[in-house]
Amino acid sequence: MRSLQVWVVALILAGLGIFMMLYKHFTLEFPLTPDTTYKSWYVEARVDLASKNPWRQGDKPVVFNLQLPHHSERFVLVDENIVARGFGYEITETDDEGNRAAVFSKRRMDSKETIFYRAVVYELDSPTAQAAEEAPPEPDSPYSKKNRPKLEEGEQDAPIYVAVDALIAEAREKSASPRTFVREITKLARDAADDRVQLVRDAVGQNVTAVEIASLLLAADGIPTRIAHGLALTEGERRATMMQWLEVYLKGEWVGIDPVHQSFGLKDRYIVWWYGDRALYSLEGNARAEAMIAVRQNTNNALTRAIWKSGQLADLFLTFSFYNLPLDAQLVFGVLLMLPVGGLVLAFLRQVVGLKTFGTFMPVLVALAFRETGLLSGILLFTLVVALGLFIRNYFDHLKLLLVPRLASVLTVVVIVLSLLAMITNQLGLVVGLSISLFPIVVLTMTIERMTLLWEEYGSDEALKTGLSSMFCAIIAYFAMNNATLGYLMFAFPELLLVVLALTMLLGRYNHYKLTEYIRFRQLQRSLAELEKKEKNGARDS
């Protein structure tokens, strides 16, 4: 019954720990390795303002309006910074499309002024859920059939309407779905040699773009559209070109069409700067402006982004996180969280493998010291201190000292030996001497005492065997506790302590043969097998 209870409790603890870890990984996007990186981009807009009439500076206030980039379900903007010396400014939403603008003002402008806008763009692994948008109204296009002027009997339709209808009819003939219809419209709008497209251009304006012609044609057919302006996120570009593309409302969502490849799925490669037919900036006053956009790709640690995102969500797991502690406390807990891992390794080596050690957790504490001294230096120091301590301990035993004074004397000797080693190694220029003070001195003292008693009761072979076994356990625990990936997992996902606790509890119910016992009893099994064989042969002969 107790065994079943242990299994149930262990499974509940392990399941709860794994569930919380998976939640943080998949929902909060905490990475599973410390080296996981992700891409981000620095986006910078630089605007140089110059007075049109330098000799008439300050005769008119200057108002400068700069469009700012959008957040989206794929990209988020963080660390937005504006540098505009001497300007007052505010950031406002300008319309229902979510357009944002920074409005700068200054009463007296110098001959030259510079405004900087900079933001970091994070690309999310999984798009964030967006609030449902209401379906846009059907576009009120002057070229739709319902808005055209009525024809008198025998009157011919205007050439612009004939061209629009012909282009829409051809696109519909070549398509089989709303998406393919949109794609064919964009192809036709890009054909500058088509007389029908030229008719549309003559009616609307020669400066109209292919994207605007496609928007006009789709609006005439009753399909909602909007024109987006933005940047392609490249590895690096000092003078990035602001691109224009078309977004169409299909099946309950806005779908962008790649202006280069004429394909859907544009949101993964472009960031929207603004929607509509306005310009990147507008200027009022006695000044002229020149804007330059730069893009540079950067590589960041994925954990930094996860912490930022979780902070934005005010998630409970980040509120009670080690990352909110002061840095010195984080360093302390980074070590403490590995102690249960060392305890689990030691429990496995003792309960399943069957290794013997001096003390229950002596190898774990020694392994903790190895983290500071280094493995080889730590083994050498441990062996040297224990050997000298054994020699002094035997001398104290010869003096017939009582138990407590004898332990205090050995403790003093251990401190003296470590102090001498620190001084000697410091004179030799060895860094290891500066770390030996972190050795668990009390543990070393008890190890010397227990090793001496074992030596006296069971002989030198058993004492040395147990000592080597303790050292082997300390080395294995050192590798487990010094693993960078495991240390990161325990710190970023402290709920894994529940899994460690569950495994330790299960080891507590292990009562089968140990691996070393199979080796010890192998000779006995062979002897029993030979004896059974002789008995069978004897019975056959008789």
Image (cartoon, rainbow, N blue to C red):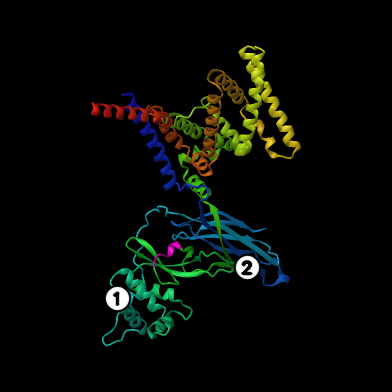
* Mark 1 vs mark 2: in front: 1
Q: Return the x and y of residue 485 as percentages of the image width and height.
A: 51, 44
Q: Is residue 267 magenta?
A: yes
**On the rendered structure, is 500 left or right of 325?**
left
Q: Return the x and y of residue 92 as percentages of the image width and height.
A: 52, 57
Q: Is residue 27 visible?
A: no
**Cα distance, mark 1 to mark 2?**
49 Å
Foreground of the two, 180 or 459: 459
Q: Quadrant of the N terminus?
A: top left
Question: Which three-letter amino acid code belongs to the residue tagged 2?
Answer: Gly
Q: Return the x and y of residue 135 as percentages of the image width and height.
A: 34, 60
Report the span colored magenta: 264-268
Q: Are marks 1 and 2 in contact (CB under 8 Å)?
A: no
Task: Tell me which label, 1 or 2, sits earlier in the chain.
Answer: 1
Foreground of the two, 132 or 475: 475
**On the rendered structure, is 520 left or right of 152?**
right
Write down the quadrant of residue 513 in the picture. Answer: top left
Q: Return the x and y of residue 302 as percentages of the image width and height.
A: 51, 50
Q: Is residue 116 visible?
A: yes
Instruction: State the residue lying farthest toward the bottom.
Output: 154
Question: Which three-letter amino acid code belongs to the residue tagged 1?
Answer: Arg
**Residue receiving disc 2:** 285
Query: Which disc, if any, is residue 172?
Result: 1
